Amino acid sequence: MSIFDDVSAHMKDAMKSGDKARLAGLRNIRAAFIEAIKVDGSATLADDAAETILRRLAKQRRESIDAYEAGGRTDLVAEEQAELVVIEAYLPKQADEATVRGWVSDAIAASGATSTKEMGKVMAALMAAHKGEVDGKLANRLVRELLPAG
Protein backbone atom coordinates (compact mmCIF):
# COMPACT_ATOMS: atom_id res chain seq x y z
CA MET A 1 0.00 0.00 0.00
CA SER A 2 1.20 3.49 -0.78
CA ILE A 3 1.54 6.24 1.81
CA PHE A 4 -1.45 8.00 0.25
CA ASP A 5 -3.60 4.87 0.64
CA ASP A 6 -2.33 4.28 4.19
CA VAL A 7 -3.27 7.82 5.22
CA SER A 8 -6.75 7.43 3.73
CA ALA A 9 -7.31 4.09 5.47
CA HIS A 10 -6.00 5.37 8.80
CA MET A 11 -8.21 8.43 8.49
CA LYS A 12 -11.28 6.18 8.23
CA ASP A 13 -10.11 4.21 11.27
CA ALA A 14 -9.61 7.43 13.26
CA MET A 15 -13.13 8.56 12.33
CA LYS A 16 -14.59 5.25 13.51
CA SER A 17 -12.65 5.28 16.78
CA GLY A 18 -13.36 8.96 17.49
CA ASP A 19 -9.67 9.88 17.80
CA LYS A 20 -10.05 13.59 17.06
CA ALA A 21 -6.40 14.58 17.43
CA ARG A 22 -5.17 11.84 15.08
CA LEU A 23 -8.01 12.56 12.65
CA ALA A 24 -7.06 16.25 12.47
CA GLY A 25 -3.46 15.38 11.63
CA LEU A 26 -4.50 12.83 9.02
CA ARG A 27 -6.92 15.27 7.40
CA ASN A 28 -4.17 17.87 7.07
CA ILE A 29 -1.83 15.30 5.52
CA ARG A 30 -4.49 14.10 3.09
CA ALA A 31 -5.38 17.68 2.13
CA ALA A 32 -1.73 18.37 1.27
CA PHE A 33 -1.61 15.15 -0.77
CA ILE A 34 -4.79 16.01 -2.67
CA GLU A 35 -3.47 19.50 -3.40
CA ALA A 36 -0.32 17.96 -4.90
CA ILE A 37 -2.40 15.54 -6.96
CA LYS A 38 -4.48 18.39 -8.36
CA VAL A 39 -1.34 20.28 -9.37
CA ASP A 40 0.13 17.14 -10.93
CA GLY A 41 -3.13 16.00 -12.52
CA SER A 42 -2.49 12.37 -11.61
CA ALA A 43 -4.82 9.89 -9.94
CA THR A 44 -2.54 9.09 -7.00
CA LEU A 45 0.68 10.23 -5.36
CA ALA A 46 4.03 8.44 -5.53
CA ASP A 47 5.64 7.61 -2.20
CA ASP A 48 8.70 9.80 -2.83
CA ALA A 49 6.43 12.80 -3.52
CA ALA A 50 4.40 11.94 -0.42
CA GLU A 51 7.57 11.82 1.70
CA THR A 52 8.62 15.23 0.39
CA ILE A 53 5.23 16.65 1.36
CA LEU A 54 5.39 14.98 4.78
CA ARG A 55 8.86 16.44 5.43
CA ARG A 56 7.56 19.90 4.52
CA LEU A 57 4.56 19.47 6.84
CA ALA A 58 6.82 18.25 9.67
CA LYS A 59 9.11 21.25 9.21
CA GLN A 60 6.11 23.59 9.31
CA ARG A 61 4.89 21.98 12.53
CA ARG A 62 8.33 22.30 14.18
CA GLU A 63 8.50 25.97 13.21
CA SER A 64 4.99 26.54 14.55
CA ILE A 65 5.86 24.80 17.80
CA ASP A 66 8.89 27.09 18.25
CA ALA A 67 6.80 30.19 17.50
CA TYR A 68 3.98 29.16 19.84
CA GLU A 69 6.43 28.33 22.63
CA ALA A 70 8.03 31.75 22.23
CA GLY A 71 4.57 33.31 22.43
CA GLY A 72 3.56 31.28 25.47
CA ARG A 73 0.70 29.49 23.66
CA THR A 74 0.98 26.06 25.27
CA ASP A 75 -2.48 25.03 24.02
CA LEU A 76 -1.40 25.50 20.41
CA VAL A 77 1.97 23.84 21.08
CA ALA A 78 0.16 20.68 22.17
CA GLU A 79 -1.98 20.64 19.01
CA GLU A 80 1.03 21.08 16.74
CA GLN A 81 2.99 18.40 18.61
CA ALA A 82 0.10 15.96 18.21
CA GLU A 83 0.02 16.62 14.47
CA LEU A 84 3.80 16.26 14.25
CA VAL A 85 3.59 12.81 15.85
CA VAL A 86 1.04 11.74 13.22
CA ILE A 87 3.15 13.13 10.36
CA GLU A 88 6.37 11.53 11.61
CA ALA A 89 4.67 8.12 11.78
CA TYR A 90 4.64 8.06 7.96
CA LEU A 91 8.23 9.23 7.49
CA PRO A 92 11.25 6.94 7.44
CA LYS A 93 13.37 7.31 10.55
CA GLN A 94 16.20 9.82 10.38
CA ALA A 95 19.77 8.71 11.02
CA ASP A 96 21.25 9.36 14.46
CA GLU A 97 23.95 11.96 15.10
CA ALA A 98 26.83 9.46 15.11
CA THR A 99 25.84 8.09 11.72
CA VAL A 100 25.37 11.57 10.25
CA ARG A 101 28.76 12.61 11.63
CA GLY A 102 30.35 9.74 9.69
CA TRP A 103 28.49 10.70 6.53
CA VAL A 104 29.56 14.33 6.92
CA SER A 105 33.21 13.25 7.30
CA ASP A 106 32.89 11.15 4.13
CA ALA A 107 31.28 14.07 2.25
CA ILE A 108 34.06 16.43 3.37
CA ALA A 109 36.68 13.97 2.14
CA ALA A 110 34.85 13.34 -1.15
CA SER A 111 34.31 17.04 -1.89
CA GLY A 112 37.81 18.09 -0.85
CA ALA A 113 36.41 20.97 1.22
CA THR A 114 38.95 22.68 3.48
CA SER A 115 36.88 25.39 5.18
CA THR A 116 33.34 26.50 5.91
CA LYS A 117 33.49 28.61 2.74
CA GLU A 118 33.05 25.34 0.85
CA MET A 119 30.18 24.16 3.00
CA GLY A 120 27.81 24.13 0.02
CA LYS A 121 29.86 21.46 -1.74
CA VAL A 122 29.80 19.26 1.37
CA MET A 123 26.06 19.69 1.92
CA ALA A 124 25.34 18.97 -1.75
CA ALA A 125 27.38 15.76 -1.63
CA LEU A 126 25.81 14.71 1.66
CA MET A 127 22.24 15.33 0.59
CA ALA A 128 22.77 13.66 -2.79
CA ALA A 129 24.06 10.52 -1.08
CA HIS A 130 21.61 10.42 1.83
CA LYS A 131 18.47 12.32 0.82
CA GLY A 132 15.64 11.61 3.21
CA GLU A 133 17.89 9.92 5.75
CA VAL A 134 19.46 13.00 7.30
CA ASP A 135 18.05 16.07 9.03
CA GLY A 136 19.38 19.17 7.27
CA LYS A 137 19.79 21.20 10.48
CA LEU A 138 21.83 18.46 12.12
CA ALA A 139 23.97 18.03 9.00
CA ASN A 140 24.56 21.78 8.80
CA ARG A 141 25.66 21.93 12.43
CA LEU A 142 28.01 18.97 12.02
CA VAL A 143 29.57 20.37 8.83
CA ARG A 144 30.28 23.62 10.69
CA GLU A 145 31.82 21.65 13.57
CA LEU A 146 34.04 19.50 11.35
CA LEU A 147 35.23 22.14 8.89
CA PRO A 148 37.61 24.86 10.05
CA ALA A 149 36.34 28.45 9.77
CA GLY A 150 37.32 30.03 6.55
Image: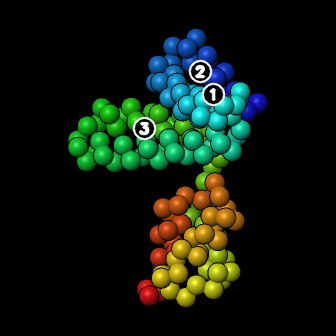
Per the image, the residue denoted by label 3 is: 81
Location of the C terminus by quadrant is bottom left
Q: Measuring from the top left, give residue 23's x and y in whole percent.
A: 51, 22
**Hey, which residue is sitting farthest right in the picture?**
1
Mark 3: few, some, or many residues within 10 Å (few <14, many ≥20)?
Answer: some
Q: Is residue 29 visible?
A: no
Q: Is residue 109 left or right of residue 142?
A: right
Amino acid at dot 3? Gln
Location of the N terminus by quadrant is top right
Per the image, the residue denoted by label 2 is: 11
The kind of secondary structure element at disc 2 is: helix
User: Which quarter of the figure has residue 41?
Assistant: top right
Amino acid at dot 1? Val
Mark 2: few, some, or many residues within 10 Å (few <14, many ≥20)?
Answer: many
Of residues 21 and 123, the one drawn nearer to the viewer in this rendering = 123
Mark 1: few, some, or many residues within 10 Å (few <14, many ≥20)?
Answer: many
Q: Residue at x 52, y 24 (%)?
A: 27
Per the image, the residue denoted by label 1 is: 7
Nearer the observer: mark 3 or 2; the answer is 2
Label 2 with label 1: CB-CB less than 8 Å? yes
Q: Residue at x 48, y 61 (%)?
A: 137
Above or below for 114 versus 18: below
